[in-house]
Amino acid sequence: MVMQDGGTVDARPGPDPGRAAPEHSGAYLATGLCLTLYAGVLSAWTIFGITQGNGGTWDFVEGLFNPGAYPPTQILGPYEWAFTIAFLVIAGMTLAQRRVARSAALLSGFVLLALSLREGVGLLHAAYRHQYSNDPLGSWALATRGLGVVVALVVLFSMFPATEREQDGHPPVSGTTGPDDRWRRLSRICGVLFLIMALAELGWALRDLTANGVDAARYLRGVVDGSVLGALDLAASAEFTTVGSVLVLLVLGVLALRGRREIRGALLVFAALELYMTVRTVVWLTVSDFFNRSFETTEGALSMATTAYGLAAMTSVVVLATGRGFGPYDGIRTEGVRAAAVGREGWL
């Protein structure tokens, strides 16, 4: 906050626009603690999988980026590994009371709730329930699913009411645009990139559904029913991750096109997740020598084009969503305030 009264300048800092309002501190604290707890549980499953698997720690580290390097004995999959990191980052930001974490936390809550509902549908089948009682890890897996329900509900019920009133902003200098206008432009770019990516992934999903030998009904059932695989598995199924990714890209893309500034955290987190999965794909294409044969068929060329677009688009969204030209929550950096207060000749 810069105030001028005669020759005296009051340069006392105003309230941090990136910090949540004091009345929401309890919601942010509860969300941060719950996400930390669930990330800890996922980390425990990951460590257990490493100790029980055929490879060592370095094999697992290589397998984080090379799908063909690590034996398929892990209990969790790459999406769970990525979300473990995301939960820890979001938890740290919510514990620090950062407003940008709200939409990311809500996205996490919806993902956990969707996974829990899918598992709940699976438990309606007696044979699937029987597997939980017979598997040595069944009780622990069920407890993890139950904890996911609790965490999802706490996050959603805590963060939904934690809306912020608009901060009083400084009017833009003549001939310039304000932070809201700049963010709307960046947001719309992110929205377009997300929607194009959603259409590309939807096209590949429809291609898989219409391929010969694919049971479309079973595929769609696998999206909402955890018993389709016929075995206990804490890793999300390919059907769920594919359809879920398309839906999230569509929803966030539409909201970003509308210039909703509060979704910046969700854009950043999901773009980073998609970028990680795309990097894994690129590594796999490299080690499998698919690059040399990709343009031999039209399908291969389209696959390469989709991968290249995903890599470029998600990297762009991550860069734009970090708001390098803005303060902690879409506000102009303090250098901009000082520049507005200083005249062209360097005097106040």
Image (cartoon, helix red, strand yellow):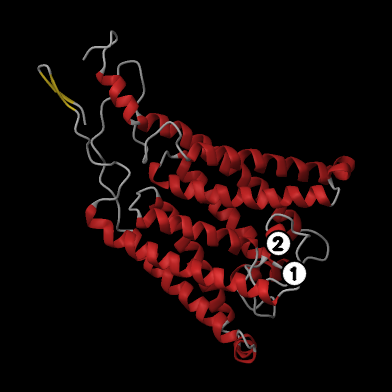
Please tell me the numbered disc located at residue 58. Answer: 2
Query: Between 200 and 139, which is closer to the camera in this rendering?
Result: 139
Question: Which secondary structure, mark 1?
Answer: loop
Q: Quadrant of the C terminus?
A: top left
Q: Position of residue 14 (x, y in %)?
A: 22, 37
Q: Is residue 297 visible?
A: no
Q: Residue at the location (34% across, 15% down)?
A: 175
User: Looking at the rendering, which quadrant does residue 92 occupy?
Assistant: bottom left
Whether 31 is drawn above or below 146: the answer is: above
Position of 66 with respect to 148 (left or right) is right
- Crowding at dot 2, Cα within 10 Å, few <14 / some 14-19 / many 20+, comes out as few
Query: Between 1 and 231, which is closer to the camera in this rendering?
Result: 1
Q: Residue at the location (71% across, 44% down)?
A: 307
Q: Position of residue 118 (x, y in %)?
A: 56, 72
Whether 97 is drawn above or below 142: the answer is: above
Give the residue number, with chain letter if any, for mark 1: 55
The three-letter code of the residue at mark 1 reads Gly
User: What distance separates the C-alpha of mark 1 from that of mark 2?
Assistant: 8 Å
User: Looking at the rendering, which quadrant does residue 42 occupy?
Assistant: bottom right
Q: Residue at the location (55% across, 60% down)?
A: 83
The three-letter code of the residue at mark 2 reads Trp
Q: Position of residue 131 (x, y in %)?
A: 64, 87
Q: Residue at the location (36% across, 57% down)?
A: 95
Residue farthest to the left, as pictured = 6
Q: Is residue 237 visible?
A: yes
Question: Which secondary structure, mark 2?
Answer: helix
Q: Quadrant of the N terminus?
A: top left
Tag 1–tag 2 contact (CB < 8 Å): yes
